[in-house]
Image: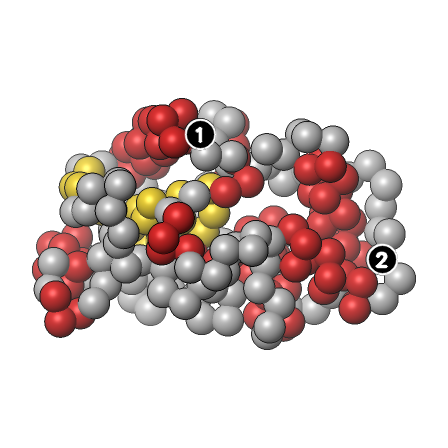
Amino acid sequence: MVVIHYTEMTSADVALERMCDPEAKVSAHYLISEAGEVTRLVAEEKRAWHAGLSYWRGHKDVNSASIGIELDHPGHLHGYRDFSEAQFEALVPLVARMVKEHNIPRANVVGHSDVAPARKIDPGELFPWERLAEYGLCLPTPKIELGDPFDNDGAFYLALERFGYDITDGHKAVEAFQRRWRPRKIDGEIDGEIRAILFQLLLDRDRGVTR
């Protein structure tokens, strides 16, 4: 897996200092500054403490099966804004190499909020997932074919868990799903549009489209 985060700190130097502090007990494999400078902090074959308590597609210890990339960014705490072009241009070849070298499915290139929906919201609704998908490095938002198939919210939650999310906190899980797949409206409420998106994602996966 590849897990993308933002630092939610005031500068890359501050983030580096924290991730290099043993007392902080937090780390990542890479940090990409807003200027596009890539710093490797942990070797990819080693475990980094970036995901925390997390879950994705049956894996309850995401840190043991993932590479963490921190993006230098103020986050929602310090003034949320678009990610810089230089940073994105540095991210693309890094993720492309990882996906190829480690045979990582596009469906396993995710955000921190996807694997820890009850605790995290990064990299947030402004992260350019669709642009990353154009390079074949993550899943694009699917084109809806069949509409809303779920009879009730319980069926939706079961399908959400089947797709990969931890649904222990259902409202937060729905918010995380919206943040990734319909970022223009994040309210934690289940509606026909997100039901249709989830069904299409599962349908595409069953067809082998969403590897």
Classed neighbour count for the residue bearing mark 1: other residues with Cα under 10 Å, few (<14), some (14–19), many (≥20): few
- Write down the quadrant of residue 156 in the picture: bottom right
Q: Is residue 22 left or right of residue 146?
A: left
Identified at 69% across, 42% down, the residue is 201
Residue 128's tag is none
Counting from the top left corner in percent of width and height, residue 163 is at 65, 51
The answer to the question of whether label 1 and label 2 lie on touching residues, with beta carbons closer than 8 A, is no
Q: Secondary structure at mark 2?
A: loop
Write down the residue under mark 2: 150
Counting from the top left corner in percent of width and height, residue 90 is at 28, 32
Counting from the top left corner in percent of width and height, residue 144 is at 77, 39
Where does the N terminus fall, quadrant-wise?
top left
Q: Is residue 113 above or below residue 136?
A: below
Classed neighbour count for the residue bearing mark 2: other residues with Cα under 10 Å, few (<14), some (14–19), many (≥20): some
Nearer to us in this view, 133 or 106? 106
Identified at 55% across, 40% down, the residue is 107
Counting from the top left corner in percent of width and height, residue 138 is at 51, 36
Q: Secondary structure at mark 1?
A: loop
Identified at 52% across, 35% down, the residue is 106
Identified at 17% across, 69% down, the residue is 24
Q: Is residue 54 left or right of residue 178?
A: left
Disc 1 to disc 2, C-alpha distance: 33 Å
Q: Is residue 106 left or right of residue 3?
A: right
Q: Is residue 145 left or right of residue 21?
A: right
Where does the C terminus fall, quadrant-wise?
top right
Of the residues shown, which amino acid type is indicated by label 2? Phe
- Write down the quadrant of residue 166 in the picture: bottom right
Q: Is residue 55 above or below residue 202?
A: below
Residue 103's tag is 1
